[in-house]
Amino acid sequence: MKKKVVSIVLAATLGATLLAGCSGSAAPAAEAPAAEAPAQEEVKEEAAEVAEEASEAVEASGDLAGKKVGVCIYQFNDNFMTLFRTELESYLKELGFTDITIVDGANDQATQSGQIDNFIADGVDVLIINPVNSSSAATITDKVVGAGIPLVYINREPDEAEEQRWADNNWDVTYVGCDARQSGTMQGEIIADLGLDAIDFNKNGKIDYIMIEGDPENIDAQYRTEFSVKALTDAGLEVNELDDQVGMWDTTKGQELVANSLAQNGNDIEVVFCNNDAMALGALESIKAAGRTVGTDIYLVGVDALTEVVEDVINGSITGTVFNDHISQSHSAADAAANYLTGAGNEHYIGCDYVKVTTENAQSILDSLK
Ligand code: GAL
């Protein structure tokens, strides 16, 4: 487990407290301490409470060891979800779970639905699901709730109507993830902050860009596409879309699409927006192959803060990215699963903030990832 303070994790988690970065089921943060020193009695009471919580946590973690967790990932072959999955597994173990099964949906909803059926037949105690198609969420929820199993959705957010059903029926179902509008906005701001003069190489007074999208069924792709451009126009910049292609979150596809677009649009492309870093890495290869140089005659932004990309931001070969905090998200998802099993329960939405990554903070983001 990275970054988080391991020693307080059990007590904090099983006391239904979320770790930094995420919100939703957490109790409001404690107020700033009063100026005077607390009375000795209070200190003793607090110490007793902490000890009690810790012993409850240990007891609960004993219970968790006997619980079966099923995890469905939409596709193992995805850079970001690999980071998420690895951290999720290690943190579930930290919480005391020992019976953890993680399966690969291979980007096929029928395959994943079969895996969910198998988990139900196998009597899992809780499910964590990264759906292949968010639009299948209602069917998945009905099946899982019908079997009396609590459910934590991750990464691909079901629509509003579906989330409303969980609240209306008071089901043990929640979603853990970030608001993709924020990541799109941050991508656009990274570009807008450079200023028109620095970007407008062809001097037409506009930002000429291409967009490389993730899976269009996925709200992350839809929002990042929309909000990155909106941040430019909100900053008073005129935009000109030269190309918009679907790269399905994939490096090779990103590379091919950007190579084609550079061949067609040549030096007119001033900005390459990629909905994620995997595709930005592919884009970078094609930009170099076309003899272009990021920061000199073109700009490139992604989302996720993959280590390689953060290193590229530091060395200037990628303009910026947005940290999609897989550590907070995976911890919150595991915490939520534990909270259902210990009876603490959860809110139906557990959010997490993105962080803008530019040359200014890239090194500290990289340090926190190691
Ligand atoms: C996004 C992430 C992408 C991809 C996608 C899968 O949040 O930025 O890289 O992993 O999730 O749903």
Image: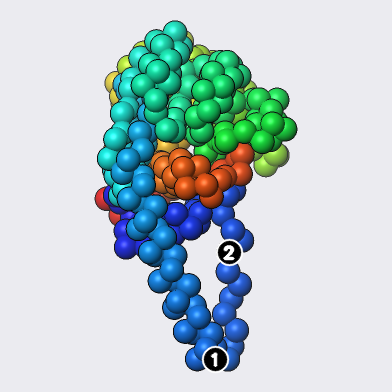
User: As rendered, which of 42 and 230 lies closer to the eye?
Assistant: 42
Task: Decide: is 298 above or below 31.
Answer: above
Q: Residue at x 60, y 84 (%)?
A: 34
Q: Quadrant of residue 146?
A: top right
The residue pinned by badge 2 equals 29
C-alpha gap between disc 1 and disc 2: 22 Å
For residue 324, above or below residue 144: below
Residue at 37% in and 33% down: 69
Task: Give me the residue at 42% from left, 42% from top.
Answer: 334
Numbered label attached to residue 39: 1
Displayed quadrant of residue 220: top right
What amino acid is at disc 2? Ala
- Please say if 250 is above or below 238: above
Is 227 situated left or right of 261 in this image?
Answer: right
Q: Residue furthest top?
A: 110
Q: Residue 47 sits in which quadrant?
A: bottom left
Q: Nearer the viewer, residue 146 or 34?
A: 146
As helix, strand or loop, the secondary structure at mark 2 comes to: loop
Q: Residues within 10 Å of mark 1 (few under 14, many from 20)?
A: few
Q: Is residue 107 left or right of residue 155?
A: left
Q: Residue 104: x and y, percent?
A: 33, 20
Regarding mark 1 in the picture, which secondary structure is present there?
Answer: loop
How many badges with numbers are in the image?
A: 2
The front one of 90 and 21 is 90
Using a 10 Å C-alpha cutoff, classify the residue at mark 2 as few (fewer than 14 neighbours), some (14 to 19) or many (20 or more): few
Image spot of residue 247 (x, y percent): 44, 16
At which x and y percent is residue 320? 44, 41
